[in-house]
Structure formats: structure tokens, C-alpha cells
Image: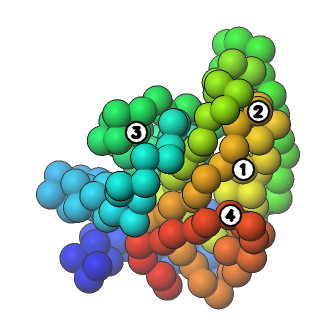
Amino acid sequence: MDRLKDKIRDIPDFPKPGIIFKDITPLVKHPATLRLTIHQLIHPFLGRDTFTAVAGMESRGFIFGSLVAWDLGIPFIPLRKPGKLPYDVQSVSYDLEYGSASLEAHLDSFEPNDRVLIIDDLLATGGTAKASCELVEKLGASVEACAFVVELDALKGREKLEGYEVYSLLHY
């Protein structure tokens, strides 16, 4: 995992003073490191054959989620910021560590019995991840697990995901 940590840089005071942003841009810039990241995200779930879809949050969750879905051979469902989807949507609002936001997905994104793996780059306070779980469930699917590239342990986001299986590659 040190190979992955070496490709994540800290950006102090972004997006506001006091926040240390974990920048995954150097990680996705290197194909071998990105490939390793995807394989490591999938590894704890191999052999289960439980997932029927992957959902990823805008925007960095699209990078990792779509690659995980492609590797598993199952659909990828984008969870978008408001106003980005052209069809009828379901929406949830949530609080971030530095503000508030909403996520949307098309009403027909999931099949009624879909079992979903939620993927994102970062688990911080857990607001985005919890909202993603709520949105998937509002649309009639079930969340089987959540996986993250980075988890900021001090922010205790995992606590908001009680009842869900949570896996993170890197812990800070």
C-alpha cells in the first residue's frame, strides 16, 4: 500500500482553510498504480458473486467505480450532482465537512433486486457515502458494501455507515 500512498499528495487549505485535501491525481496519472488500486479495491470481494451493479459518486467515484464495474463485468451507475441528469431523478441531500450537497440518480438506474457496491475515492465524515446508500435504497436496490481508496480515520465517517460492510485501501 505504500506504493499507492506515494502517489497521493496533500494539498493544504483546500477547498478551505484547515482542510488537507488528499489529491489522487498523481495516482490516476500512472496506469500501473491505477490498475493496482482497482485490483486492490476488488480483492476483498472476489469470489462472492454478490454484486449486480456498481455506483460511484460524482466526480472521483466515477473514475474508480467505472473501472471496478468494467473489471467485474457489471453495470456502472453514476450518482450525480443536481441538474446533471436529463431524465426523471430521485435525490438526497446531505452535509459535508465543509458545506452541504445533494446527489441524484435516474429513477430507472437500478433493477428492483440489484445488489450494489458503492465506490468512491475518499471516506471522510461519511455524509456523501451515507447519502449514496440512501439514494440507492430509495431506488429499490440494496447496498451490499462500500469501498474507498482513502479513509480519513479521525473524521469517523465509518460510523455513519453502521450496518454496511466498509472497506478502505489506505487509512490516514
Mark 4 lies on residue: 164
Give me the residue at 71% from left, 27% from top: 112
Image disc number at residue 69: 3
Placement of the N terminus among the 4 image quadrants: bottom left
Q: Position of residue 70 (x, y in %)?
A: 33, 36
Q: Nearer the viewer, mark 1 or mark 2?
A: 2
- Is 81 above or below relative to 165? above
Q: CA distance from mark 1 to mark 3?
A: 17 Å
Q: Of label 1 and label 3, which has the lower sequence position?
A: 3
Q: Of label 4 and label 1, which has the lower sequence position?
A: 1
Disc 3 element:
helix
Q: Amino acid at mark 1?
A: Cys
Q: Amino acid at mark 4?
A: Tyr
Q: CA distance from mark 2 to mark 4?
A: 16 Å
Q: CA distance from mark 3 to mark 2?
A: 19 Å
Image disc number at residue 133: 1
Q: Nearer the viewer, mark 3 or mark 4?
A: 4
Q: CA distance from mark 1 to mark 2?
A: 11 Å
Residues tagged 2 and 4 counted as in contact (Cβ below 8 A):
no
